[in-house]
Image: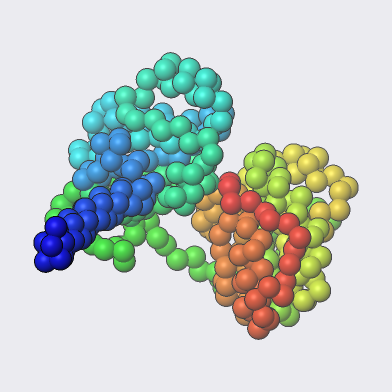
């Protein structure tokens, strides 16, 4: 073969190889895109919820409120009470056999997704049980919280069903309401285990305050309570007092639960749901970190790293300065 033919053949082979590599690149890019599909999108797609307004309950077998939520979803679904609304349940119980048997008997009539490692709950930021998530036709979360009022839910669904374009990441969230914290600090007067009733503001320290809303029955509240000695002890070194606010339990249950144990912080209690309602506590444990003037710096789960960040921000400390030596819990 002469040199000219060799050069032409070489160029042809190179071009062919380039074409093959380009095709492989496109194929791999497609594979990458498929592999990168968010878990939330995959869940919606696999359960025929894409392009639909859907109410998803994240629940747990054995949880009374989760059961009430499931009963409500089943009733709404059976009665077709809210047009254009689809339903799903995400179950966090770990025992697959128990889960299969439970839902085979319940016959909900809509998809049930077993989420024993809570990966989907984390993806939807719904690790509080029960937690209700309303998703619009474009896969965006438009409500996340406790079981919504049926009339309000119907109005929300009607509005979402009428949307024709994706509202984007800054879509309006339903059900958000402000808590008049300054007023509530003054008006919320609760008795303590060892003293008369005081306003919550009286516990506020010169550098702020951490309030942790709990009850005696939730295991996740128990985790937060067990951490309080470390958390309160660390914050005390920065002149930030802590207080446990026990809600919704009878007085005898509160006194029996706490007994003579040293929690590390004062315990106040409300035997009614008044404090829970006025402070809009949808789950326990709920933590609220206050600045010295009583404004809220952080409100959310009892994840101590988040609380530490709020304290550092309030105290003008470098990130990582405050370490509690415990993680807390992202569940409730």
With 309 as the anchor, is 255 left or right in this view? right
Residue 46 in picture, x, y percent from top left: 30, 36
Residue furthest front as drawn: 2
Residue 9 in picture, x, y percent from top left: 14, 59
Residue furthest bottom as drawn: 316
Residue 176 in picture, x, y percent from top left: 40, 60
Query: Number of callouts in the render?
Result: 0
Quarter location, residue 312: bottom right
- State the residue in front, 163 or 274: 163
Residue 284 in picture, x, y percent from top left: 60, 49
Residue furthest right as drawn: 260
Image point (48%, 17%), residue name: 101
Image point (21%, 45%), residue name: 51
With 159 as the anchor, is 258 left or right in this view? right
Image point (75%, 54%), residue name: 227
With 307 as the anchor, is 141 left or right in this view? left
Image height of 220 relative to 195, above or below: above
- State the residue in front, 15 or 52: 15
Residue 152 shows in this picture:
no
Image point (28%, 26%), residue name: 78
- State the residue in front, 275 or 100: 100
Image height of 163 relative to 58, above or below: below
Residue 80 shows in this picture:
yes
Q: How is the image coloured?
A: rainbow
Quarter location, residue 77: top left
Q: Quadrant of the N terminus?
A: bottom left
With 52 as the anchor, is 262 left or right in this view? right
């Amino acid at each position: 073969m002469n040199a000219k033919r060799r050069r032409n053949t070489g160029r042809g082979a190179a071009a062919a190889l380039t074409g093959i590599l380009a095709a492989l690149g496109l194929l791999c890019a497609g594979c990458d895109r498929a592999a990168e599909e968010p878990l939330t999108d995959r869940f919606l797609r696999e359960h025929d919820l894409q392009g639909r307004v859907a109410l998803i309950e994240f629940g747990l077998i054995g949880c009374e409120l989760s059961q009430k939520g499931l009963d409500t979803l089943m009733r709404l679904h059976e009665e077709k009470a809210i047009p254009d609304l689809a339903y799903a349940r995400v179950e966090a119980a770990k025992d697959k056999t128990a889960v299969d048997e439970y839902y085979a008997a319940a016959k909900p009539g809509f998809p049930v997704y077993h989420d024993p490692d809570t990966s989907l709950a984390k993806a939807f930021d719904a690790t509080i049980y029960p937690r209700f998530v309303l998703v619009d036709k474009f896969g965006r979360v438009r409500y996340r919280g406790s079981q919504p009022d049926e009339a309000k839910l119907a109005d929300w669904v009607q509005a979402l069903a009428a949307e024709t374009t994706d509202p984007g990441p800054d879509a309006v969230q339903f059900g958000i309401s402000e808590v008049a914290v300054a007023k509530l600090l003054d008006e919320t007067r609760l008795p303590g285990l060892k003293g008369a009733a005081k306003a919550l503001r009286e516990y506020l320290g010169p550098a702020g305050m951490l309030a942790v809303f709990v009850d005696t029955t939730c295991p996740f509240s128990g985790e937060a309570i067990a951490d309080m000695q470390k958390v309160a002890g660390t914050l005390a070194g920065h002149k930030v007092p802590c207080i446990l606010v026990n809600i919704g339990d009878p007085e005898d249950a509160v006194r029996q639960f706490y007994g003579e144990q040293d929690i590390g912080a004062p315990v106040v209690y409300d035997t009614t749901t008044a404090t829970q309602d006025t402070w809009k506590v949808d789950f326990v444990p709920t933590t609220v970190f206050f600045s010295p003037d009583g404004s809220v710096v952080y409100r959310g789960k009892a994840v101590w790293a988040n609380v530490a960040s709020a304290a550092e921000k309030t105290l003008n400390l470098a990130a990582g300065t405050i370490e509690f030596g415990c993680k807390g819990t992202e569940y409730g």
